[in-house]
Image: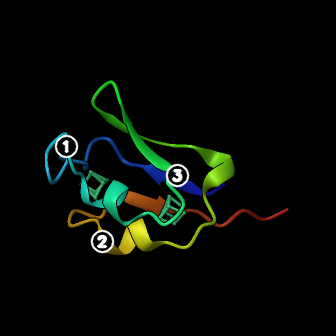
Amino acid sequence: MVVEIDYDKCNLCGGYNEPLCIDKCPDAALSLREKRIVVTEFLCEDCNECGYICPVDAIIIKTVTF
Ligand code: SF4
Ligand code: SF4
């Protein structure tokens, strides 16, 4: 998985009920836990829908190289 949340930037847009990235993720890979967005790694397909929708660029898609 390569999605990381920058917690310094994330302002939980949409409030606790409907953060945009959670709403957008087609694979339910994002969830809210203890007031933070967390990524369930094995569900994420790196589609970057969350990265596009985030208004403050708090979602970083990293490229993994082996
Ligand atoms: S990259 Fe796609 S699958 Fe992964 S968390 Fe973001 S929206 Fe969900
Ligand atoms: S879309 Fe961005 S600012 Fe909004 S909750 Fe997700 S990571 Fe945070």
- Work out how far the residue at label 3 is from the one at label 1, CA to CA, in angstroms: 16 Å
Q: Amino acid at mark 2?
A: Ile
Label 2 residue near ligand 2, CB within 8 Å = yes
> Tag 1: Cα neighbours inside 10 Å, few (<14), some, or many (≥20)?
few
Classify 11 as above or below 65: above
Q: Secondary structure at mark 3?
A: loop
Compute the Cα span from label 2 to label 1. Answer: 16 Å
Disc on res. 1: none
Classify mark 3: residues with Cα within 10 Å, few (<14), some (14-19) or many (20+): some
Label 2 with label 3: CB-CB less than 8 Å: no
Asked if residue 58 can be seen in this view, the reply is no
Among the 4 quarters of the image, the one containing residue 24: bottom left
Does mark 3's beta carbon lie closer than 8 Å to ligand 1?
yes
- Mark 1 residue type: Asn
- Name the residue at 36% across, 48% down: 6
Q: Residue at x 27, y 30 (%)?
A: 35
Mark 1 residue's CB less than 8 Å from ligand 2: no
Quadrant of the rendering where the C terminus is positioned: bottom right
Q: CA distance from mark 2 to mark 3?
A: 15 Å
Please give left or right for residue 47 compared with residue 50 in the image.
Answer: right
Mark 1 falls on what kind of element? loop
Q: Which residue is mark 1?
A: 17
Mark 3 and mark 1 residues within 8 Å of each other at the beta carbon:
no
Check disc 3 and give the amino acid type: Ala
**Residue 29 x, y percent position in the rendering:** 52, 51
**Mark 2 Cα shell of 10 Å, populated few (<14), some (14-19), many (≥20):** some
User: In terms of sequence position, does the residue under pointer 2 or pointer 1 come before the other?
Assistant: 1
| Residue to which mark 2 is pinned | 53
Residue sitting farthest toward the right: 66
Residue 46: where, in percent of width, then height? 59, 67
Q: Which mark is residue 29?
A: 3
Q: Earlier in the sequence, mark 2 or mark 3?
A: 3
